[in-house]
Image (cartoon, helix red, strand yellow):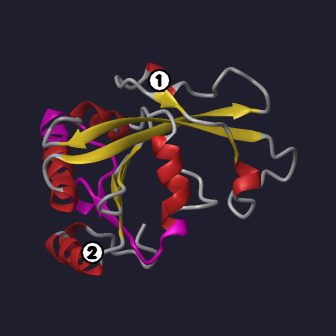
Amino acid sequence: MTNTFERKWNKSFPNKAPISYVFKYYFPNSWIRIYSLPDGKRYADNAIEHESLLKVQNQIISDCLGSGTPIFIVSGNYFIGNSSEPIYDQTSILSYNFISGSPINLHEIDPEYFDDGENNDLFFTPIFTESKWELNLHNDLLLKIANDETRAFLISFEKDIIIAPYDGGLDLIIKNQELQCKIRQKYSDMLSKREDQL
């Protein structure tokens, strides 16, 4: 399994970094942002709001993927140059048996979005594991992302769907126009009203 995710990712999305915050730029025609809490509230303040957030996110993801769908859970660590010490160690935060992929020089793979104007020596090492989507199976992951403790995304290569939770909601990459329309209609009151849809 060591290279399974990387092989599939590079075949499907060549020269694109597997980093969730750039997906809205990579896939503008497939991207939908849905808030988790009313009025675009960023963070849950209490147990009731946490429960509501999880219910909403689980339902949206289930509407996209369906129960039992094989997925990869993908996160990653940033490194400066040849350092072996990650800036943030995601493996210590998330309770999955991750496999580390090959380091990516972000400026080399995508100079448009990753240019620090200086050394351009920021590396990203993806970490990934295979799992399946089931309701409430990944609540710990969703809560940690919602609380801005970590970053990760889910991908189904078979369904060509990426689910990228963030601290505020979910970014969905759905190429199937029919499904995209259904999701937009069902969750229309939870979409951004901003012109840039953020």
Which numbered marker is on residue 112? none
Residue at numbered disc 2 = 180
Kindly tell me whether residue 189 is visible in this rendering. yes
Q: Which residues are magenta?
A: 25-51
Residue 91's disc is 1
How packed mark 2 is, by other alpha carbons closer than 10 Å (few <14, some 14-19, many 20 or more), is some
Viewer can see residue 20: no
Residue placed furthest toward the right: 118
Q: Say whether residue 90 is magenta.
A: no
Question: Which residue is at 23% across, 36% downward?
Answer: 138
Q: Up-down: is 141 above or below 161?
A: above
Residue drawn at 31 percent across, 46 percent down: 71
Q: If you read the primary sequence from the N terminus, does the residue marked by circle 2 or circle 1 appear first?
A: 1
Residue 150 image point, x, y percent: 44, 34
- In the rendered image, residue 111, in percent from the top left (x then y), is placed at 75, 60
Q: Which quarter of the figure is the C terminus placed in?
A: bottom left
Q: Quadrant of residue 174?
A: bottom left
Q: Is residue 33 above or below residue 4?
A: below
Label 1 crowd (10 A; few <14 / some 14-19 / many >=20): some
Expressed as whole percent of the image width and height from the top left, the position of residue 33 reads: 35, 64
Q: Amino acid at mark 1?
A: Thr
Residue name at image x 14 percent, y 72 percent: 186
Foreground residue among 189 and 77: 77
Query: What's the residue at 64%, 39% (across, down)?
Result: 124
82 with respect to 140 (left or right):
right
Residue 133 placement, left or right of 30: left
Could you tell whether 91 is left or right of 10 in the image? left
Check disc 2 and report its element: helix, strand or loop: helix
Q: For mark 1, give the secondary structure.
A: helix
Q: CA distance from mark 2 to mark 1?
A: 32 Å
